[in-house]
Amino acid sequence: MPYVSNADLPPSVRNHLPPHAQDIYRAAFNNAYDEHEGDPRQEEASHRIAWAAVKRSYRKEGDAWVPR
């Protein structure tokens, strides 16, 4: 299901990513969710695509996600 706000994101995203990265994740997830309508793995694919979008702008340094 698409996310209306960052507060709706899963805890694994909300508790680990900075706010801007959460914005990226949410936008990418929502777009991918719409694009994969009818696919039985719609939600799984959308999460993968969203993480890939975050990783283009952020990298993990220790336990923190930092801008590239």
Image (tube, helix red, strand yellow):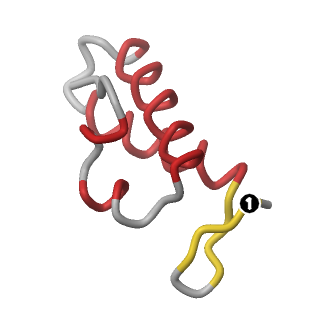
Looking at the rendered image, the quarter that the N terminus falls into is top left
The residue drawn where x is 25% and y is 58% is 11
Q: Against 66, is 5 above or below? A: above
The residue drawn where x is 35% and y is 22% is 33
Q: At numbered mark 1, what does the secondary structure look like: helix, strand or loop?
A: strand
- Give x and y (percent) for residue 2: 28, 23
Residue placed most toward the observer, 26 or 32: 26
Residue position for label 1: 67
- Give x and y (percent) for residue 12: 30, 61
Q: Against 50, is 60 above or below? A: below
In-image side of 59 versus 4 (left or right): right
In-image side of 62 versus 33 (left or right): right
- Give x and y (percent) for residue 68: 80, 61
Three-letter residue code for mark 1: Pro
**Badge count:** 1
The residue drawn where x is 59% and y is 87% is 62
Residue placed most toward the observer, 57 or 48: 57
